[in-house]
Image (tube, grey):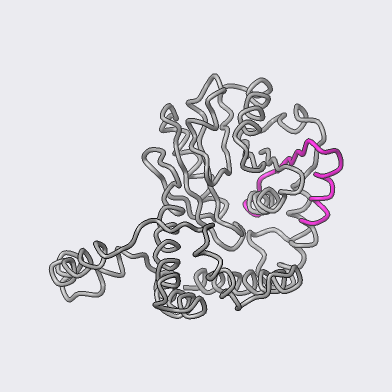
Amino acid sequence: PMLNWFGPGYGLIGRSWAMVFASGGYSVKIYDNQPGQSTKAIVEIKKQLQELEDAQMLRGEATALQQVALISSYDDLSQALEGAFFVQECVFEQLEVKQSIFQDIERLVGKDVILSSSTSCLVPSNVFSKVQNRSRCLVSHPVNPPYYVKLVELVPHPETAPAVMDTTHTLMTKVGQAPVRLRKEIDGFALNRVQAAIIAESWRLVQDGIISVKDIDLVMSEGLGMRYAFIGPMETMHLNAPEGLEDYMKRYGPGIQRVLTSFGPVPDFCGEGSKGIINMCELIPSDEQHLSARKDRRDQLLMGLAKLKKDH
């Protein structure tokens, strides 16, 4: 069995983890500190798995009903932890809350149980600072929505045992995710650091009047994103010169350095200048109905892309 934890109102990642682990054939116990929330989550999970099955996008070998049967809900933490070998925490991004949760969990589990956090913005040395045995702790950071976007960043605490990283990597691979290992912790991990660089330059180009909001999004969705859905920046460069990466850098390295030196300062995303960009974001009205429809569209497209990647 395995525990999956998520907090009130923040259930998307927790539900997604439960679905991913169940697709791999594992028994999943979910706990929420708000009574009844974990039971509601299973109702939602059942609905989602049946919809995925109808769309022929269900992961794993078992049927939707067989996978739902692997998931059980608990309002009592000690019962939820009983028999678990791996704990995945999914509460909101508040350091003190996460620290307190892991203190509670550590008191209730054996020394070999792996303690993993879904945090996207807190480094392991802070998240696990109040845990006694930090050698079995790590961050397993998913990408939203994890059921379609399979990357998981495995980020060690400075004291994390190599075997814990290996076991987690094997587990994530077995349930169909795509784990990557960071050799040490760093603010933003890898994905959000790369994403921040893209956001910053996109913001500057719009703010400086070079390009519109709509068109900078097209630069990614119809340009870079087409390649990056299947190959990363390193392989892209390697394939774009007759003799590979070294040849590419001989040809284009000086130009890349020139462009990089022309980059402006880190933007003020909440200052006066940002209002123009936010007002220009005319693509999607900000009301709940329009945003919800676009999120559904995003998930449908990601589902299709995930299927395409699987078939190739």
Q: Residue at x 80, y 51 (%)?
A: 42
Name the one closer to the observer, 34 or 153. 34
Q: Quick check: 266 above or below 55?
A: above
* Image spot of residue 132 (x, y percent): 54, 19
Q: Residue at x 55, y 32 (%)?
A: 127
Q: Which residues are magenta?
A: 23-45
Q: Quick check: 226 above or below 42?
A: below
* Image spot of residue 226 (x, y percent): 43, 76
Q: Quick check: 157 above or below 61?
A: above
Extreme-right residue of the structure: 36
Asked whether, in this view, residue 311 is left or right of residue 249, the answer is right
Asked whether, in this view, residue 184 is left or right of residue 66, the answer is left
Question: Based on the displayed image, in which of its 4 quarters is residue 119 positioned?
Answer: top right
Name the one closer to the observer, 255 or 225. 255
* Image spot of residue 225 (x, y percent): 44, 73
Magenta segment includes 206: no
Q: Residue at x 41, y 29 (%)?
A: 158
Magenta segment includes 30: yes
Quadrant containing the N terminus is top right
